[in-house]
Image: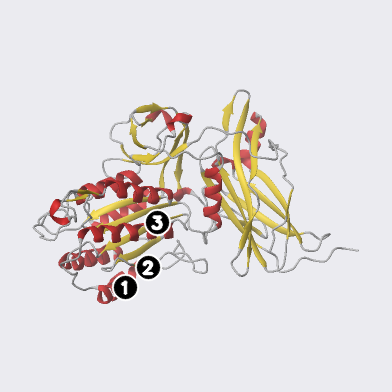
Amino acid sequence: MRLHIAIGLLLALAPLAGDGESPPRERLVDLDVVAVDAHGQPVSGLTLEDFRVTDAGRPQKIAFFRHFDARLRQPPALAPNEVSNRSRSNIPHATVILLDMLNERFETRAFAADQLAHNLQSLETADYLYLYLLTLNGRLYAVRGLPGAADPPSGPQAAPWTRQAKSLMDAAMRRFMQVRPVDIDVAVRVQLTYTALEELSVELSKVPGRKNLVWITDGVPISLGPRRSDTGDFVDFTQPLRQLSEHLGLSGVAVYPVRQVMMGSPDAMGAGRGDGIGSEETLDEVAGLTGGRPDAGKDIGQAIRQAMNDVRTGYQIGYYPPVQHWDGKFHKLRVSCSRKGVRIQAKSGYYAHPEPPGAEARRAIDAVASTPFDAAEIGLRAKLSPDPHSAGTAHLAVRIDANDVVIAREEHQYTAHLRLAVIGYQSDGRKEASAIIPLDLHYSDQQRSQALQQGVPFANDLKIEENLKAFRCVVFDSGSNAVGSVTIPVPAAAPSPKP
């Protein structure tokens, strides 16, 4: 199957800058930031001037700033045969709970499972909430797993599955509850844990939007002492931990650890037998590097409620460091707020890997192409209409919500830099994408105002071949690294051309 796309851009408000990739631009570092008060409640009303960002100790000029609140988004009113990526059937974000049986002792596992079930049953909502176990053999088991392409999401209209949390947890614990072998090597346990977390991050990467991971665990050590290493030397797990955190960050996952260990337990991963050092440090590190909450001492219910709350609202901040900044090294980050009583939560560092121009857009579009649900950071509405004059051809009309993209003031005009692709999906699961289409917008004041009210129009004439079941239009904003996609079913049959 080949996907043939005849490009016809409806850009009365926004002419296309050129046929190819536009000249290389500075590369954006984008941060998801949570701001809460002393009671852990989200703080709204902050402005760009309230924030300070340093990268490797150097102050940065904030170029992009936005407050988002998924709770305020309402599904748009649609015209006949029109679809949107902000319908109630989509998944805008996810909170995942991981009960880590591998790194808990026998008694603590039962206590943690009981507390987890109790707290889940008391939740008022289970919107986009999922539950996994990390079993004693290092495998992931879905008690309430992420939905697939054919599964309905556990959104606002679904009955809360947490009402059956006790029976679900009892069944899972009966299946996997067993005594952990006392001679299991700690280094192997660390490796199994990191592998499972990477597998979970891959699974979570299929869900667009923000993802918070509540990790209920005793933790794994940041290093091993001489008595537990093959060489008799200390073993440092800092580098694998940073690599794991990078994978989690690329998947949009922030970690909220909850350390469950009984006082005086001889089996704690960081104390008692010389088997490991600094499990609390590991948990704080992975939380900081992914933008989660580093406090591993919270109770299970509080951590779940905070993670679910934080995933719905927050701030996006972006800045453009100089080209020489991208040196492949680890950079420490610090985000602070000048307002009193506001606590800031953001990732504490990242690897500044150099990339060729356009790599971020390509990566984002490829990721969205493989997910079962649409990304909704950028609002999109679309309609696919068969061409009455051309058999096997349809007209795709898309409206991009201009309020969700960065339209920056540059001298006497407003500009935005979007990248688009159209993906065709066959009934057997195969897919093919168009080339990336650069869409560089240049607005006057009047054109900008009109775009904010009506959206940015985009259109394609598409050749519909046999077994093609759907198209997906993907939009990437280079000014914020935000992405949106909308999937449009292919009409059952296109009419024959008129004589």
> Dot 2: what SS?
strand
Asked whether the viewer can see residue 123, the reply is: no
Mark carried by residue 42? none
User: In percent of the image, x 45 and y 39: which residue is there?
Assistant: 30
- The residue that mark 1 highlights is 168
Q: CA distance from mark 3 to mark 2?
A: 16 Å
* Mark 3 touches mark 2? (CB < 8 Å): no
Q: Nearer the viewer, residue 350 or 489?
A: 350
Task: Compare marks 1 and 2 and give the one earlier in the sequence.
Answer: 2
Q: Nearer the viewer, residue 276 or 361?
A: 276
Q: CA distance from mark 1 to mark 3?
A: 23 Å
- The residue that mark 2 highlights is 144
Residue occupying the far right of the picture:
499
Residue 209, given in percent of the width and then of the height, sits at 46, 51
Residue 5, given in percent of the width and then of the height, sits at 72, 53
Task: Compare marks 1 and 3 and give the one earlier in the sequence.
Answer: 1
Q: CA distance from mark 1 to mark 2?
A: 9 Å
Task: Give the residue type that dot 2 points to.
Answer: Arg
User: In percent of the image, x 64 and y 29: which residue is there?
Assistant: 445
